[in-house]
């Protein structure tokens, strides 16, 4: 069996946000940082990024939604995790479903410190319910900063693909 990877496109790329649910579990390890790199999920996957996840605490966060007509490339960070860490990530991403991304939909940045191999699995989190920001459910600045970080990194590398 190959490696297990999570494609993060919002706050999940910030390792400091993992500690709250990871304490006392195997997910508390730093092993998932050993293989990490900027990546793009291609428009052929059929999704686009959108501020469409409303948290139970009252803010709107970044998500993706299925869009056969308007699908776009989605930039993010791909990082390896242990299979045993997936339930912890599922807990962190409550309100999102973890879905598989076939490898032919994923492009790694040329300077990534790893490659994807046959048998590897890539997961992305997709909101279960689509709800957009409004005056009572604003965007969270940390999520905005995370998504802008990925875009700036891609632009600096000459690989900007847009939001």
Image (spheres, rainbow, N blue to C red):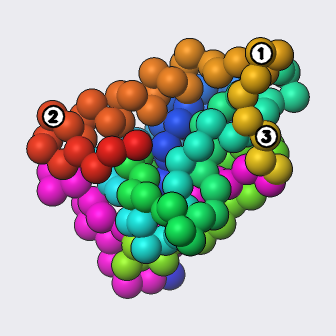
Cα separation between marks 1 and 3: 13 Å
Q: Is residue 124 visible?
A: yes
Residue linked to disc 1: 135
Residue mark closest to the camera, 2 vs 1:
1
Residue 104: which numbered mark, if any? none
User: For the view shown, which residue lies furthest in the right direction?
Assistant: 56
Look at the image and give the residue range highlighted in magenta.
106-128
149 to the left or right of 85: left
Give the residue displayed 49% in from the left and 43% down from the top.
9
Residue linked to disc 3: 131
Q: Is residue 111 above or below residue 99?
A: above
Q: Is residue 76 above or below residue 151?
A: below
Q: Is residue 58 above or below residue 93?
A: above
Residue 46 among those drawn in magenta = no
Horizontal and vertical percent for residue 21?
73, 32
Within-10-Å neighbours for mark 2: few <14, some 14–19, many 20+: few
33 to the left or right of 89: left
Q: In this rendered view, identify the residue nearer to me: 37 or 20.
A: 37
2 to the left or right of 90: left
Give the residue displayed 68% in from the left and 60% down from the top.
98
Residue linked to disc 2: 156
Q: Quadrant of the C terminus?
A: top left
Q: Is residue 84 visible?
A: no
The tag earlier along the polypeptide, 3 or 2, is 3
Residue mark closest to the camera, 3 vs 2:
3
The tag earlier along the polypeptide, 2 or 1, is 1
Give the residue displayed 67% in from the left and 47% down from the top.
89
């Amino acid at each position: 069996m190959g490696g297990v990877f999570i494609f993060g496109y919002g706050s999940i790329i910030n390792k400091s946000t993992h500690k709250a649910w990871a304490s006392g579990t195997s997910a508390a390890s730093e092993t998932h940082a050993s293989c990490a790199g900027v990546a793009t999920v291609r428009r052929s996957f059929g999704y686009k990024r959108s501020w469409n996840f409303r948290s139970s605490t009252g803010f709107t966060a970044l998500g993706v939604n299925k869009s056969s007509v308007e699908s776009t490339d989605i930039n993010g960070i791909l990082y390896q995790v242990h299979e045993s860490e997936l339930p912890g990530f599922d807990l962190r991403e409550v309100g999102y479903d973890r879905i598989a991304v076939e490898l032919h939909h994923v492009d790694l940045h040329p300077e990534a410190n790893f490659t994807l191999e046959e048998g590897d699995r890539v997961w992305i989190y997709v909101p279960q319910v689509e709800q957009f920001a409004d005056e009572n459910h604003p965007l969270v600045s940390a999520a905005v900063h995370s998504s802008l970080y990925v875009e700036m990194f891609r632009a600096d590398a000459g690989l900007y693909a847009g939001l």
